[in-house]
Image (cartoon, rainbow, N blue to C red):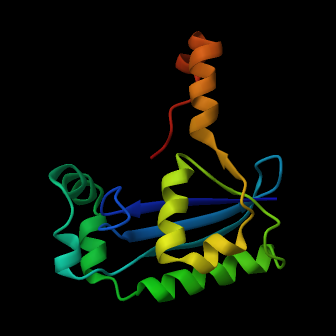
Amino acid sequence: MLIWMDLEMTGLDESRHVIVEIATLVTDDDLNIIAEGPNLVIHQPDEVMAEMDDFVTNMHTVSGLLEKIKTSTISEADAMQQTLDFIKEHSPEPNKIPLCGNSIRTDRTFLAKYMPEIENWLHYRCVDVSTIKELVKRWNPGLEHARPKSEG
């Protein structure tokens, strides 16, 4: 079993940026989806949002996330608890299932700071899709261009 997560943040510096969205799903070892967890947009105050640079502000505006953040009533603590409850449904024992995702190291750093209960529940190992992409680029460059386009 694998736990997949995707976080959106106000930037990449965990000392001044925060999590604004967290989505989770569980797959079996063959990547078949077992369960889709909550996709939660976290409300953040204006002074926190002011820390975003122009690139991130534009990205979150174009995607519609910025407006969802403003209207969300979900706190960081609520998002952490809902996500942890979902993970525990599928991984009742701590430190058994790795965290998976794309460039997951950054997400894991933010989890450690803002949602340590989640970070501590997951196994210390990670499955990072970006590692696979980098190896394919080096070992079989033509194959990278043949991959299916992502949907998001």
Residue 92 in which image quadrant: bottom right
Q: How many marks?
A: 0
- The x, y position of residue 55, in whole percent, is 20, 49
- 39 above or below 82? above
Residue 138 visible in the displayed image: yes
Which residue is at a point 75% across and 79% down the rendered structure image?
88
Query: Is 39 positioned to the left or the right of 45 in the image?
Result: right
- The x, y position of residue 23, in whole percent, is 53, 66
- 108 above or below 59? below
- The x, y position of residue 125, in whole percent, is 73, 54
Which residue is at a point 49% across and 43% down the rendered structure image?
151
Residue 6 visible in the displayed image: no
- 125 above or below 81? above
The furthest residue to the front = 15
- 92 above or below 119? below
Which residue is at a point 33% across and 81% down the rendered structure image?
43
The answer to which of 132 and 61 lies nearer the viewer is: 132
Residue 4 in which image quadrant: bottom right
- The x, y position of residue 136, in whole percent, is 62, 21
Position of the N terminus, as image quadrant, is: bottom right
Which residue is at a point 68% across and 78% down the rendered structure image?
86
Query: Is 85 positioned to the left or the right of 72 in the image?
Result: right
